Image: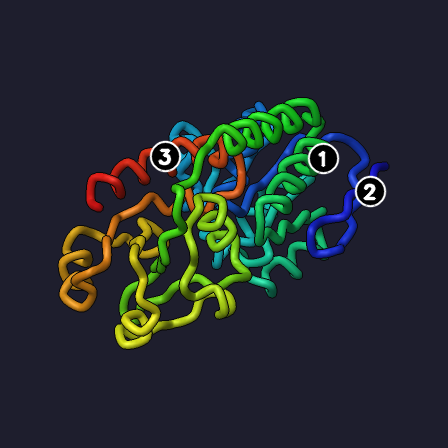
Amino acid sequence: MTAFTDQTGATIQLPYAPQRIISAVPSQTELLFHLGLSNEVVGITKFCVHPSEWSRTKQRVGGTKKLNLETIRQLHPDLIIANKEENTKEQIEALQKKYPVWISDINNLKEAYQMIEQVGCMTGHPSQAAELVSNILQNFSAFTPLPYQPRTAYFIWQAPYMTVGGDTFIHAMLEAAGLKNVFADKKRYPEVTIEELRFAKPELLLLSSEPFPFKQKHIYELQKHLPGTAILLVDGEMFSWYGSRLLQAPGYFKKLFSELEINR
């Protein structure tokens, strides 16, 4: 029997490397695939779109905010991997009464690396997890941020507009990219008005592809209010997924900055 303490401080006991894993978090589903756990993962959410073959073949257990507890029961999991922010507290607490549930709580890159390593240890793949973290660190160390820090706002929702505060993982990724979050003094995901956005004077506004799928038409709408601001559509997975997707983030940031240079 081995004890593992999750990122909320709760401890679970695993008698052996789990053979029937359910992932309730898209980013961590992709991580499990990267670690080579195709046979062990038996259930994922409908939002777990990577890898595509899993989204077509694995049993779906509902959405991240509305898990199907009966489907989970039928799958007889010996480990459920969840997230404090993405999953519903009441449902996770109900699952904890019946199954080992390991919960991540990630607000920065250090916590993301810890999660990857812990998941690797729990699933019997510690060397693969350690190699993944090493490769992510190497990619970030080879990445050169812009020589200046553009004042940046990042939108995750429309009607109402919602941005990211300084205590979020997206904020940490903005910093890693060399961008200055103009709403860093706010908490979590606050609503902001056009007036507040104008007052913040962002040089750059990033419109995420998720959870709200911003499109080109939203750039046109916002550009009327911010004529001097560069506005770009960005891949939200690169800023908010804290698993193996981090391997690709530095290269994505480099490409994004090349677009910025064109627009300057």
Q: Position of residue 156 (x, y in %)?
A: 36, 58
The secondary element bearing badge 2 is classed as: strand
Amino acid, disc 1: Met
* Residue 37 seen in render: no
Nearest the viewer among 199 and 1 is: 199
The residue that appears at 37% across and 58% down in the rendered structure is: 151
Upstream in sequence: badge 1 or badge 2: 2
Task: Give the answer, above or below, for where 30 lies relative to 178.
Answer: above
- Residue bearing the label numbered 2: 3
Report helix, strand or loop for mark 3.
helix
Q: Marks 2 and 3, how far apart in space?
A: 40 Å
Viewer-nearest residue: 115 or 171: 171
Find residue 124 and report its image quarter.
top right
Q: Earlier in the sequence, mark 3 or mark 1?
A: 1
Residue tagged 3:
254
Quadrant assignment for the N terminus: top right
Q: Position of residue 129 (x, y in %)?
A: 64, 28
